[in-house]
Image: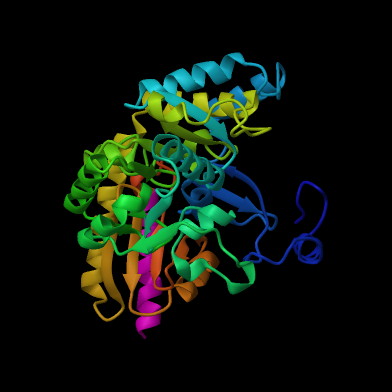
Amino acid sequence: MTGVYGKSTREYLDAAGSSLFPNYRQFPVVFTSGRGSRLRDTDGKEYLDFVAGIATCNLGHCHPGVTRAIVNQAGRLVHVSNWYYSDVQAILAERLTSLTNLDRVFFCNSGAEASETAIKLARKRSFEKYGAGRNLIISFYGAFHGRTMKALTATDPKHHLEAFSPYPEGFVHIAPGDIENLEGHLPSASALFVELVQGEGGVNLIDRDFLLKAADLCRKEDVLFMVDEVQTGMGRCGALFAHQVYGIEPDVMTLAKGLANGFPIGAVLAKSDLAAALGPGTHGSTFGGNPLACSAALATLNILEAEDLPRRAQAAGKRLRGGLEKLMEKYPSLVKGVKGLGLLMGLELSQPAAPFVQTLLEKGYLVTAVAETTLRFTPPLTISDIEVDSVLAALDETLAESSG
């Protein structure tokens, strides 16, 4: 079989292999179409997708409501400069602030850009209020905030390469739960930047009691409590935003991934007095908040609400967790633990996870490996019970084969 451009799978792989940067470890599969939780490749093989673009296609592939919004908007207006307003950008900004306790939105194109914006906001606000000397950004070991230089520096140091040095100054990492270390750094800090569930770090939940104490200490020291909801937001953890599950209110929140169901967009939300630090000329984005991206995001929000998909994430996540826990009981030498929240779920293994990802791919199931020994499951929030049971059965078979 051939793809829509008339080439065989081998020809697509050869073209990509000779033309693309070699920075990804890509599987030799070429996808051409998707619908809901299913993807199809150039050979006509169908796959059940428990990756969803890395927690991005929360409504499933090619949701008709989002597709209609993109097509309709593309026929009206695709892009204007941020020297002007657009109708859909204004409506999306108003909608996002109405769903949170935050008042202002900055639009960009990705989670890494959102992290950069949040860091710049924290430092400029601190400088204007206190002068130099309180610019430290505190983040956690196990964190992942993006791959631009400042976002990468806030990310766990295991991702830092010497060849990229020198790294920006003014960043420090602490272990989640280390309240004494946090207290020691706060007088020099402008922000504490946290993922409530560390997706790339191994699907690690940060302890709620610690986070409540940390947020309280930040406010006492006038340090911003910034929450990275790039992977956890947009219904994935059982509420529209994970901080709502935790019962914690951020000063600043970053969004991307699921915000427009796969169309590139990022956002930073902040309270009005904080947002004021980024006045005219301090920050910007050529494509950020363009009408096409905003239209896709607005449609995504409407569908998440109309179909009550955060609640679906709760129910499907409970079913997935229950099945994974049964596998842990069945294969105690292979499975060390089950962790996660909603439909951001991890299965911790006693050996490298990558071979299991490969085997499941061959069986027609897509999952990812994080932190070397954890299988991560981030399916669309529209995933059915039958599809959850299907991946559990395939995983059961794979674990049985591995255990001999």
Q: In the rendered image of this protein, does residue 279 appear above or below residue 179?
A: above
Instruction: From the image, give the main secondary structure of the stretch colored magenta.
Output: helix
Q: Quadrant of the C terminus?
A: bottom left
Identified at 36% across, 27% down, the residue is: 102
Rendered location of residue 307, percent (x, y): 37, 28
Which quadrant holds residue 373? bottom left
Q: In the rendered image of this protein, does residue 243 appear above or below residue 278?
A: below
Q: Is residue 122 magenta?
A: no
- In this view of the protein, which residue sits in the foreground, 286 or 174? 174
In the displayed orientation, state which residue is furthest to the front: 131
- In this view of the protein, which residue sits in the foreground, 179 or 351? 179
In-image side of 100 versus 147 (left or right): left
Rendered location of residue 33, percent (x, y): 64, 45
Q: In the rendered image of this protein, does residue 283 appear above or below residue 324?
A: above
Identified at 52% across, 61% down, the residue is: 364
In-image side of 402 versus 267 (left or right): left
Q: Is residue 234 visible?
A: no
Q: What's the magenta region?
A: 387-404
In the displayed orientation, state which residue is furthest to the top: 87
The colour style of the image is: rainbow
Q: Quadrant of the N terminus?
A: bottom right
Identified at 82% across, 56% down, the residue is: 7
Q: Is residue 258 visible?
A: yes
